[in-house]
Each structure stands twice: as structure tokens, then as C-alpha cells.
Image (cartoon, rainbow, N blue to C red):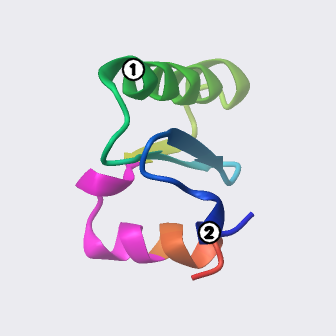
Amino acid sequence: MSGDSLNEGDCFVLDLGLQLYCWFGAQANMFEKAKAGEIAQAIKQNDRKMKANLDFVQDCTPEGQDAFWAAMGG
């Protein structure tokens, strides 16, 4: 897992247990964004019993963005 694996044409879900992140590439289409959000919500609801926090990286606080990039290796 590294930041180099992300690309602007896709969406990604980072699962850190009780912290989930959705990252949307700038060129991702609305269907990709919707599916990534759907997958992240399903993990939160079904696998984590609503105890996980879900953040969308573009909407995160600077601290949340820092935590996402740190988990991705910088």
C-alpha cells in the first residue's frame, strides 16, 4: 500500500479498521465515486456495525488528510 498506487482515474477505499477513507481521483466518473462510497458504507454498516468513522479525503480536515497520507506511506 502506497500513495504511488493511487491514480486520478479511479477511486479507492482505505480500510484501517475503525477508520475508513474514500479517495476520489480527479478524473473518476460519478459511477466510480458512487460505487466506492457504497463499498465504504457497506463496510461501515455491516463489517464494523456502525462503529467505524468514514471520511472522504477531499472533505477531511487537514489532520484527517495527514492521517490518510501517513497511512499510505506519505
Quadrant where the N terminus lies? Answer: bottom right
- The mark nearer the N terminus, 1 or 2, is 2
Most prominent secondary structure in the magenta stretch? helix
Drawn side of residue 47 relative to residue 12, left or right: right
Of circles 1 and 2, the one toward us is 2
CA separation, marks 1 and 2?
23 Å
Farthest bottom residue? Answer: 74
Residue occupying image coordinates x 33% and y 41%: 27
Relative placement, left or right, of 45 versus 64 is: right
Placement of 1 over or under 33, stated as above or below: below
Alpha-carbon neighbours of circle 2 within 10 Å: few (<14), some, or many (≥20)?
Answer: few
Magenta stretch: includes residue 57: yes
Residue 71 in the figure: left or right of residue 30: right
| Residue beneath the point at 68% across and 54% down | 16
Q: Nearer the viewer, residue 55 or 74?
A: 74
Estimate the x, y position of residue 15 in percent, counting from the top left.
66, 47
Residue type (three-letter) at the residue carrying disc 1: Ala
**From the viewer's perspective, is residue 44 above or below residue 26?**
above
| Residue plotted at (39% across, 20% down) | 34
Secondary structure state at the residue bearing disc 1:
helix
Q: Which of the two residues, 10 or 55, is positioned nearer the viewer here? A: 10
Name the residue that disc number 2 marks.
Answer: 4
Q: Position of residue 51 (x, y in %)?
A: 57, 37
Asked if the residue at tag 2 contacts the one at tag 1, i.e. Cβ–Cβ closer than 8 Å, the answer is: no
Who is closer to the viewer here, 42 or 31? 31
The amino acid at mark 2 is Asp
Q: What residue is shown with label 1?
A: 34
Q: Position of residue 26 (x, y in %)?
A: 31, 48
Tag count = 2
Magenta-colored span:
56-66
Q: Position of residue 56 (x, y in %)?
A: 36, 46
Res. 52 image quadrant: top right
